[in-house]
Image (cartoon, grey):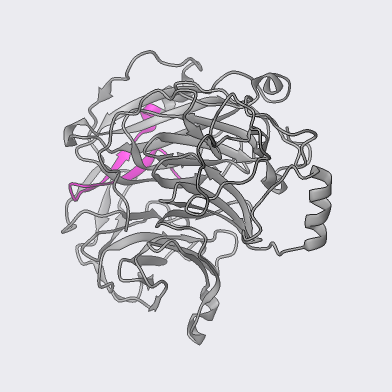
């Protein structure tokens, strides 16, 4: 299990050689044909540089909010259920990993003017390496074109900070009431917060970037639960029953939270027990309010039903190493994805559990631990994975190798694409340049948008080759 950000340092302004996208930006034009670089496989020769290809993205921005964040969440807003026009605005909540416990905070923030443009899947001409720009709070690509098609300038960050004792191991917002958030602290406490006032202030404020460091505000949580016997990382809100919560710790215990009112919870002191080691992640069923799944350092995934006692309904070996993360498919509820410490991730069909092996797909692409995994909220066959190998990958499980289609695409691009031959056909996109990737989330209201956090800040990206999720008349 790889979770903590070692030796966290205050995020600093990037210079124009900082890595992003598929590598570091550069103003020089490569003298040799470009190719996709694979970390852990390829080596940089003397004089070679990694470059980002901005034409691979509809939108690409980077920003930071101070200390590195191990965990964050995208908040549901009232700006539209399905948005397809640049520029975008998004709301977030994130927890810090500061050097001293008293320096930590939860950031509640808005990022507006997220600009971009819809790219052609087959570029008209080869991209040069100088189409990239960098800023203190954001990176954007091809601003001149953005002016015509999707806004211009850099995104605007507005931030409120709330004091939090100890590092934030994980933070999650309730989907039904996104101003209600739960945080796991390395002090061993789980807390529930009401950030309504901060979100209202951000929504009403003009889109002007703040100057200087924001003041850290003191606010009491609605609930502070100290019943866990160790710190933890696993927490999830129920998508079917508003307010219902589960939290799991490194002592293999899981506690159930039931809402007593809009601002109070009853936490069952008797935990669910079944794992032989730390509970790493929890996921409620997208369709059944009493059913949730857990994964553990013991290599197992367990399925629980809150109505039938404190023992798991079933448990099965999912990986030969720690199971770090799981994601339950919201569009195909029979599918559960899991990511492991050995770099592999698997897709399980829960309908096959009674028959034995539930694995319907298994991938060994990543070379280091999988740190986050999440199904797309708009495409049931698509999921994103982040790894400690500094790659964020997007996969479409419905894809198969088609040699005729590949030949046709290669002819159209006139050899512009020099991709490795051994990449899995289901691998749709590779995003690189992030350092020590920790967590990713899809934006449920902006099809194709992914946000990730790492030791060097946040990335907002919209790959150009997942346009199938966008309406035809989208920008």
What residue sits 72% from the left and 25% below the top?
149
In front here: 26 or 199?
26
Residue 120 placement (x, y as % from top left): 76, 38
Question: Is residue 133 left or right of 297 when viewed as pictured?
Answer: right
Quadrant of the rendering where the C terminus is positioned: top right
What residue sits 65% from the left and 40% below the top?
34
What residue sits 55% from the left and 34% below the top?
78
Question: Is residue 397 left or right of 375 when viewed as pictured?
Answer: right
In front here: 427 or 30?
30
Residue 23 placement (x, y as % from top left): 53, 37
In front here: 82 or 290?
82
Total marks in image: 0
Farthest residue to the bottom: give it: 355
Q: Quadrant of residue 246?
A: bottom left
Q: Quadrant of residue 30?
A: top right
Q: Is residue 367 above or below residue 465?
A: below
Q: Which residues are magenta?
A: 173-198
Residue 243 placement (x, y as % from top left): 38, 51
Q: Is residue 453 above or below residue 138?
A: below
Residue 310 placement (x, y as % from top left): 28, 73
Whether residue 256 is in magenta: the answer is no
Whether residue 195 is in magenta: the answer is yes
Residue 79 visible, this angle: no
Residue 397 visible, this angle: yes
What residue sits 83% from the left and 48% below the top?
411
In front here: 281 or 310?
281
Q: Is residue 21 above or below residue 337?
A: above
Quadrant of the rendering where the N terminus is positioned: bottom left
């Amino acid at each position: 299990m790889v979770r903590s950000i070692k030796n966290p340092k205050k995020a600093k302004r990037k210079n124009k050689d900082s890595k992003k996208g598929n590598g570091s930006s550069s103003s020089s034009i490569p003298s040799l044909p470009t190719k996709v670089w694979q970390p852990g496989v390829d080596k940089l020769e003397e004089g070679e540089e990694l470059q980002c290809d901005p034409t691979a993205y509809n939108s690409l921005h980077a920003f930071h909010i101070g200390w590195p964040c191990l965990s964050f969440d995208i908040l549901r807003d009232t700006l539209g259920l399905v948005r397809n026009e640049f520029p975008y605005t998004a709301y977030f909540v994130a927890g810090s990993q500061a050097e001293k416990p008293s320096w930590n905070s939860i950031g509640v923030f808005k990022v507006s003017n997220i600009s971009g443009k819809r790219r052609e899947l087959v570029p008209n001409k080869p991209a040069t390496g100088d189409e990239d720009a960098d800023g203190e709070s954001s990176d954007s690509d091809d601003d001149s074109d953005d002016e015509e098609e999707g806004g211009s300038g850099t995104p605007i960050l507005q931030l409120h900070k709330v004091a939090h004792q100890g590092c934030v191991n994980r933070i999650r917002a309730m989907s039904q009431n996104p101003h209600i958030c739960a945080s796991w602290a390395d002090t061993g406490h789980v807390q529930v917060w009401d950030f309504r006032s901060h979100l209202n202030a951000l929504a009403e404020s003009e889109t002007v970037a703040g100057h200087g460091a924001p003041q850290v505000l003191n606010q009491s949580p609605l609930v502070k639960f100290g019943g866990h016997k160790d710190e933890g990382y696993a927490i999830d809100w129920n998508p079917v029953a508003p307010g219902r919560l589960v939290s799991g710790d490194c002592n293999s215990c899981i506690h159930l939270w039931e809402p007593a009112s809009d601002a109070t919870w009853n936490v069952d002191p008797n935990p669910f027990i079944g794992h032989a080691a730390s509970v790493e992640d929890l996921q409620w069923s997208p369709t059944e309010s009493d059913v949730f799944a857990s994964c553990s350092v013991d290599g197992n995934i367990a399925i629980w039903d809150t109505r039938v006692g404190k023992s798991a309904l079933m448990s099965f070996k999912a990986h030969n190493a720690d199971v770090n993360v799981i994601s339950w498919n919201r569009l195909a509820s029979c599918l559960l994805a899991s990511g492991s410490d050995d770099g592999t991730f698997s897709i399980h069909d829960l309908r096959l559990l009674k028959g034995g092996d539930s694995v319907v797909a298994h991938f060994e692409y990543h070379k280091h631990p999988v740190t986050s995994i999440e199904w797309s909220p708009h495409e049931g066959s698509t999921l994103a994975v982040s790894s400690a190998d500094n790659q964020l990958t997007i996969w479409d499980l419905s894809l198969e190798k088609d040699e005729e289609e590949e030949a046709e695409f290669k002819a159209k691009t006139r050899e512009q694409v020099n991709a490795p031959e051994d990449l899995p056909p289901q691998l749709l996109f590779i995003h690189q340049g992030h350092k020590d990737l920790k967590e990713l989330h899809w934006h449920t209201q902006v099809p194709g948008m992914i946000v990730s956090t790492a030791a060097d800040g946040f990335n907002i990206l919209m790959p150009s080759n997942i346009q199938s999720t966008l309406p035809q008349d989208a920008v």
